[in-house]
Amino acid sequence: MTAKKLTAELRGLLKTPLGPVMDNEEAVLAVKQYVERLITVGDICSYELIMRGIVPHVSIYDGRSLRQGVNHNIVELIERHYAKKHHVKNERGTINEDAIAVIERALADAQNSCIMVDGEEDLLALVAIMKGREGDIVVYGQPNAGAVFVKVDAEVKRKAKMIYDRME
């Protein structure tokens, strides 16, 4: 399986979020304004939205937050809301072909699904943006800052692809 790795230069670039950073309440209000599909990347943002009655079309999570295991109730709550569950391996600091394929399948499916990542899901927000439809909403966690709210359009897709293409 081929994987692309994040470089030190790109790690610094990704400290700048691809959309506005919000707290959980702001993210919920912003998501409620849109009727397009919602994709979440991260245990806490997936959990917080589901707890407020908003079930994403696709939730991507790894059972960890800030590299620490999350309470098993968080993972159970996420999984309880999906009939379709996927599992994929993706090492920290990478994006691999299998993860891309699983995300593409989940996004193409009319049925909502969750994707449990064995490894790390953080960079998969780039894939969700690249593979999402224009108008989709991607919400991903920004460490120690909140949730990043991204309305997918041609410009943000271009930025995500540029970062992905520069990975080694």
Image: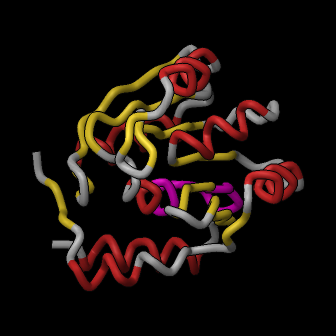
In the rendering, at what x and y percent does residue 25 appear? 82, 52
Q: Within the magenta stretch, is there residue 137? A: yes
The quadrant where residue 110 appears: top right
**Is residue 62 at all visible to an observer of this figure?**
no
Q: In which quarter of the image is the N terminus?
A: top left
> Residue 151 vs residue 7: left or right?
right
Q: In this view, does 72 lie to the left or right of 8?
A: right
48 lies left or right of 15: right
**Residue 64 screen position, x and y as percent:** 41, 39
Residue 27 vertical position relative to residue 11 in the rendered view, above or below = above
Which residue sits at x=32%, y=42%?
Answer: 101
Quadrant hosting residue 53: top right
Residue at (32, 46) in percent of width and height: 120
Tell whether 57 sits left or right of 88. right
Q: Against 66, is 78 above or below?
A: above
Name the residue at 15% across, 72% down. 168
Residue 116 falls inside the magenta stretch: no
Can residue 146 be seen by looking at this rendering? yes
Image: 37 above or below 146: above
- Decide which of 110, 162 is in the foreground and name it: 162
- Residue 149 in the image, given as x and y percentages of width and height: 67, 63
Instruction: Point out the stretch of residues depicted in magenta.
Output: 128-138
Q: Which residue occupies the foreground of this view, 29 or 168?
A: 29
